[in-house]
Structure formats: structure tokens, C-alpha cells
Amino acid sequence: MRYTAEEVMQYVAEEDVKFIRLAFCDVFGRQKNISIMPPELKRAFEQGIAFDASAVKGFGGDICSDLFLHPDPDTLSVLPWRPEQGRVVRMYCAVKTPGGRTHECDTRSMLIAAATKAAAEGLSFRFSARPQFCLYKTDRTGERTYIPFDKAGYLDIAPLDKGENVRRQICLNLEKMGIYPESSCHRSAGGQNEISFRAGEPLATADNVMSFVTAVKTAASSNGLIADFSPEPADSRFIIGIRVKDDRDGSRIRLAAEGIERYLPEMAPYLSASAAVPSAPVIKPDGSTELILPDPSANPYVVLSLLLRAATWGITRRGEGTGGDVISRHIPENMKKLFCEG
């Protein structure tokens, strides 16, 4: 459902909303937020809400200065695990300078720019995303261990699969947020789980991944567990599916896959914290292409924006012979340094 700023303010007034979380993520995909009260919502829409940029990697420079969060009303969602009385809602935000310019390391805006470029070429993509995760036990102090929650294997059921109630809780919360799961299962390693949800437009898919990660970690915590999206030690993966609209003969998806494969080595540092290069995209019988990334914790906005750029180039072949400029020129220098250091 799409909302305007006025509709959001009306919703907040009528539905007993007491806290509004203004969310964004750093360049590595870790979600951040500021909570404001309803009287500050109008100012948030008109002027933005300031935060200390120097405290967030990728956003602070040599001079300490504030940046501003500008909420996107289309992303309004209730957080169903918070109390019904005095509700909490969340919106994703653009990160802007005091002068109103989008900050170069605002990765959500990077994805918006990539989708706009594709649309200008007459292309429309749909993405699915399945970041696998592991559930681990905690110790007596509540700190994480590396002891898996269970020892079940691929598609096992209870009592071997101890995570089914946690997955149920996650799926129900996602539905309340307007994100619709299609399937859930236990994967091959102990404590390893997967939930897939419907494919969507690139920005909606990346937003859903961010919401999914929060829902998973919250459900795990409420059950005395830790949810881990890192690739080790359970060899978890981030599975991306890509479709091209109006691709009747399958030629566009093949060209898109070729573009992605060409630029995979260049994109690899931004798709995974490890040195591993993702496997080449595979064309599926249903007319999509699938890519398996080695890091479920990767920033979904960065991942989808780069894949979108490469897929668009693959179909249009614009910019061929530029020596990798198709990808590199869209990655800010500050972000390049951070990923290289990482």
C-alpha cells in the first residue's frame, strides 16, 4: 500500500502510534534508526531529522557534521512485536546533507538510481532474495555461542527441527508487515534455516530483506537464541533470483546473466565480506536467472544496485569497452576504501 506524508500523519494520529522509527543502514548493511515522537513527524517530512554522521562508517568525513534522515512514507510499517498500545511504526529514509543533497553513501538511494536507469532503458526487473540464517544457543549470560539450536538436516521436521516455531513466528510477523512468505524450511547444517518471500521490484525487495533480518533477529532473541546471517561456520548463502519483464523468448534474461557474469569479479568485494567470487548466474527453467552469493549479511541495496547495473548493461550493451566503468563509477570513493579495508 502506498502512503503520502499526510496519510502517514493521519495514521499515526488515529492508530495510537507513539514512536516512529526512522531507519537506514550503513554501507555494510547494518540497520540503524532514530525513534521520534508523533509531534516531530511533520518536521521529519519537511526538514529531516539530524544524526551524528561521524559516528556511522561511510557517512562521516574529516569534519564532524550532521546528516539528515528524510522518511519515505511508502515504507510505513507497524512493528508487530512491539506493544499494540502505544504502537511503534517504521519508515526507511533517504540520507541527505544539510543542503538537501543525497549523501553519496546512502545505499538505498544507490538502488533507486540503478532502477531509474533501467527504467529509462525500458527495462523492468523483479528480484527475489533468500538470505539463509542460523540459530545458535546463548550462554548463561545471554551471549552467543556457536552451538547450533538443533542438529537437523535438509527439510527435516520436528522434533529434529527445533526451529519450526521460530520460523512460524517470523512468518506471521512478516505477514503483519505486508511481506508475504512463500515457504520456510530447515537447511542442511545444524540450526540453519531459510524463508523465501514473494519477488518484487528491486527497491521493495531490498527493503523487505532489511525488514526480514530485523524480524528474524527479534524472533530469535524472544526465544533466547541468536540469529546469525554470516556465511560461517554453517556455509549459509544469499540466493538472488532475477526476472525481466516482457521477456517472451528468454533472450533478455540470458543477456542480463551475461552482463552479471562479466562484472562479477569487479562486484565481488561489495557482494561478500570474504574474498570469494560468487558463482556465475544460472538460467532456470522458469525463465529467471539465479545467483548464489557467499554472504547473507551483505548490504541488499548494494547487492541489488550492482546486479541491476550489470544486468542492464548486459541487455543494452551500453558503455562496452569502458574498462569496467559501468560498475566502478557508481561506487563512491569513500565506500571503495571501506570495503577494501574490510
Image (spheres, rainbow, N blue to C red):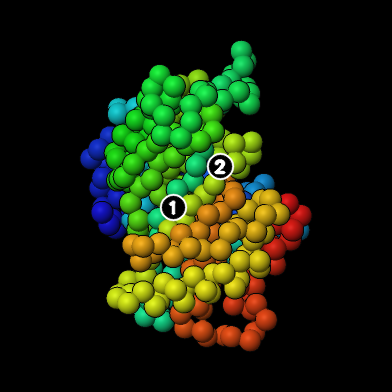
Horizontal relation, residue 274 to residue 18: left or right: right
Give the number of the disc on residue 236: 2
Give the number of the disc on residue 140: none
Residue of label 1 = 129
41 or 201: nearer the viewer = 201
- Give the x, y percent position of residue 274: 68, 50
Position of 193 relative to 54 (above/below): above
- Give the x, y percent position of residue 337: 74, 61
Position of 244 relative to 19 (above/below): below
**Residue at 54%, 69% in the rendered image:** 260
**Residue at 60%, 71% in the rendered image:** 263
306 or 240: nearer the viewer = 240
- Give the x, y percent position of residue 160: 44, 22
Name the residue type under label 1: Ala
Check contact, mark 1 vs mark 2: CB within 8 A: no
**Mark 1–mark 2 distance (CA, rounded to whole Å):** 13 Å
Q: Does the image show residue 40?
A: no
Name the residue type under label 2: Ser
Foreground label between 1 and 2: 2
As drawn, which residue projects farthest toward the top? 140
